Image (cartoon, grey):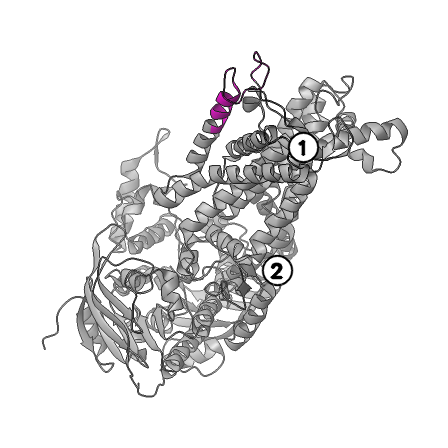
Amino acid sequence: MTADPVGPGDGTSAVTAWFGTRIGGVLVPLAATVLAFFIGGLVVAITGHNPFSTYKAIFEGTGLNWFFPWVTGEARDAAANDLQQTLVLWTPLVLTGLAVAFAFRCGLFNIGGLGQYWVGFIAALYVGTHLEGLSRPLHILLAIAVSIVAGGIWGGIAGLLKATVGAHEVITTIMLNWIAIFGGSYLFEIGGPLQGSQESIPSSAGVVDSAKLWPIWGSLPALHAGIFIALTALLVYHLLLNRTTLGFEVRAVGFNPEAARYGGISVAKNYFLALAISGAFAGLAGSVDVLGFKFGVDVGDFSTNLIAFTGIAVALLGRNKAVGILFAALLFAALEIGTSTRQLDPAVFEPELATNLATMIQALVIFFVGAELIIIYVWRARRYVRPQARIRPELES
Amino acid sequence: MVDVAPLLELRGITKAFPGVIANDGVDFELRKGEVHALLGENGAGKSTLMNILYGLYHPDEGELRLNGKPLRISSPREAIDAGIGMVHQHFMLIPVMTVAENIVLAAEPKRGPFLDEQAAEGRVRELSERFGLAVRPDARVDSISVGMQQRAEILKALYRGAEILILDEPTAVLTPQEAKELFEIIRSLQADGKSIIFISHKLNEVLEIADRITVLRLGKNVDTVPRAGATVEGLAKLMVGREVVLRVEKPPAQPGEPLLTAEDLVVLDDRGLEACRGVSFELKAGEILGIAGVDGNGQTELIDALTGLRRPSGGRIIAAGTDITGASARDVLDLGVGHIPEDRQVRGLVLDFTLAENLALHDFRQEPESKWGWLYPRRLIERAGRLLKEFDVRGGGPKTLASALSGGNQQKVVIAREVSRDPRILVAAQPTRGLDVGAIEFVHRRLVEERDEGRGILLVSFELEEILSLSDRIIVLYEGRIVGEYPPTVSEEELGIAMTGARRAA
């Protein structure tokens, strides 16, 4: 094989590179989202509803209209309430999105965000329900630190297995998810070692006040200080990847493990580190949820709360970039809140259907992001057709 | 004899891509029954021109004529219908299917709704015998050699009725023996009246096979010359646009103290078999030691062991007085061993990294590139800017992705990185593979310069010419053993015989 199938003189690689960095980075996720909403709208129309008023109602349900200055009075208060909830959901979505994205950048697919989230959640919950009397900042900090370590260990186990015996991370992280879920169920089950004070209810005790994250806006539930943790995490993620030698190594391994090895980088070490750090982000997501607004857990939650899986969608749509994840998490959080039973007027669109609509749009977005190649193909085909039109008259003359 | 009226004409073909004009008013004509070589450096626009002919690109301007009539080709399908077949550099075969199945694909002989396996194999066998291709129709593609796969591609084009055959750098993937066989096939195709466009940047083979040679440079025609009277030097000048020093000029070596010693080295390959079976040699400062051999005789494993990428199962390696047997790649690097790897795209570069990042691939952990784990991208970029200038890398700056460069410039980036670390020992594996004459000249000159700086250079190459012209001493690796040592004055024949394992009577 020669090393140079397509040189820049042939132009194609230059075109692709340019497309990939300049247009593809923003255009593809944007086009995917628009397309998904368009098809969602068609489905709404088929079910006999008006897609425009449905989308308008969903949008108002997200509270994002709070940013419009002309929304005033009661509508503004309602919008504020909705926006608080959207942002409360945005917080863990960012963190689980970062978890998946970090592993992706090392060429690994961490499906274990769910397990790592719960392990972090339980660890923070344990600290948060004990050690009463500790000063508030210290208690919170301790709970968060423990959750980061717990999530990191959970991810790190998969990383260690990958690094030492080559066990595929997709398999091991899925298995670790189940261990976390069933382990958590056991802990808080009736008679379980960490069950709360109410003997007949399989749930945990409540987080004591000194471990609760500060509420910063509203009350139903309040937007809590976890939002700053998420913002900080975005910054940390960006700096870690792009401004540290660790990030350099992770990216090198992710792009080309063979070249990384040749460059003197230990591939196994980076597999371990990437999954451990990935797990730490997911564990952090668990702690902001439990310290921010959940304050406890019912055994039933373990099988119904799938927020960490949505993190995969967030990372895909956000292209594993900090800014992308910020917006992708906002989209999915807004979609979830905007279509929730409480927010949507049944006269416009049945809320039961709306939840399905949200799931469908989510799936379509992922589908179209994955179908990036199709979009590139269409875009390039357009370029090649144009010159052809110019040359035809000459040939036929 | 060659018919004089053109069979195929391309007139004034222009094709621009954002930022580059790949073809700028190119003319090309092909006569019936001739082998017409299209010669040019990487990026001269050869492939673009042929992709236009094959319907993969549409020209911005210009026209195509077949037998004097205007021809419009907007897809490979239409090219095939017009009797034009193309064998790409990278084969388009489905590995799990048989040769016959691949060849008849999209035009299968059928029995009812099913593929008529016997008819397919029969037709393939008939074609194969007619042109002396010796391909087994019932063999699975993933079980045959690269040379055979190429023949299957040629058969595929013939099966679809190709009268004009485009061969895009066909020898790039072949061993010298396979290349010889390919040339015989080309001659038998020619005898049958087929016309062949032979794309290459290798001067010798163009002179061997072509009737006429058209040279492209920077997207423009330079000249079309008949083979008679053409010389390697003349063609090189046309191709590069200046006089090229093809023979490496170097002062005699001044060997110093031993720098790299291998003692009885045993290295296993990926399957766990012994690829090196007790290799011993000594590389001195200020000399180029060439390791000759046919691909697959333990070279890859030997290089891996020397550079810390593979743990030897026996023997010792001593570099600059330190035992590095089984040391990590990083330790070996830090000891001052530079390594120009065999495959720059798989190993030498992270193609999705910028040039600045690639140039820092070994050094990003050290000051000033980083401190306490904190990376300083601006320093990476500054340093890359200097190196790119010093090594005359064209086609991009520090922030350009490595994948956007041509092969020659990619290789310059690798060499810049290795040499700039001031290594005492430089292991150069196939340093000019896939490069054109201009870039080869650069690499060769640079290696001699590094030698004269007092570095020890271990050159591993499958190209005899390269070994002979660069090395101060030559050792031959055959089946994992060193079977002889020669001075650079040895004849190509003698070295070639040694490479096949026949021992020198000495």
Give the residues drawn in magenta, as a range.
A180-202
Would residue B98 be found to the left or right of residue B17 on screen? left
* Secondary-structure class at tag 2: loop
Q: Position of residue A176 (x, y in %)?
A: 45, 32
Residue type of the residue flagged with mark 1: Ser
Quarter where residue A157 is shown:
top left
Residue A198 drawn in magenta: yes
Q: Give residue B158's mark.
A: none
Q: Nearer the viewer, mark 1 or mark 2?
A: 1
Residue at 84% over, 29% down: A77
Would residue B505 be found to the left or right of residue A248 on screen? left
Image quarter of the N terminus of chain B: bottom left
Q: Position of residue B437 (x, y in %)?
A: 42, 74
Q: Report the predominant secondary structure element of the magenta stretch.
A: loop
Q: Residues within 10 Å of mark 1 (few under 14, many from 20)?
A: many
Quarter where residue A346 is shown:
top right
Q: Which residue is mark 1?
A: A210
Q: Residue furthest front?
A: A133
CA–CA distance in space, label 1 to label 2: 72 Å
Is residue B79 in view? Answer: yes
Give the answer, above or below, for where B72 lies relative to A143. Answer: below
Give the answer, above or below, for where B457 lies relative to A271. Answer: below
Q: Nearer the viewer, residue B91 or B505?
A: B505
* Secondary-structure class at tag 1: helix
Residue type of the residue flagged with mark 2: Asp
Q: Nearer the viewer, residue A324 or A245?
A: A245
Chain of the residue under the numbered disc 1 shown in the image: A
Q: Position of residue A222 (x, y in %)?
A: 74, 30
Is residue B187 in view? Answer: no
Q: Which residue is mark 2?
A: B60
Residue at 22% over, 81% down: B487
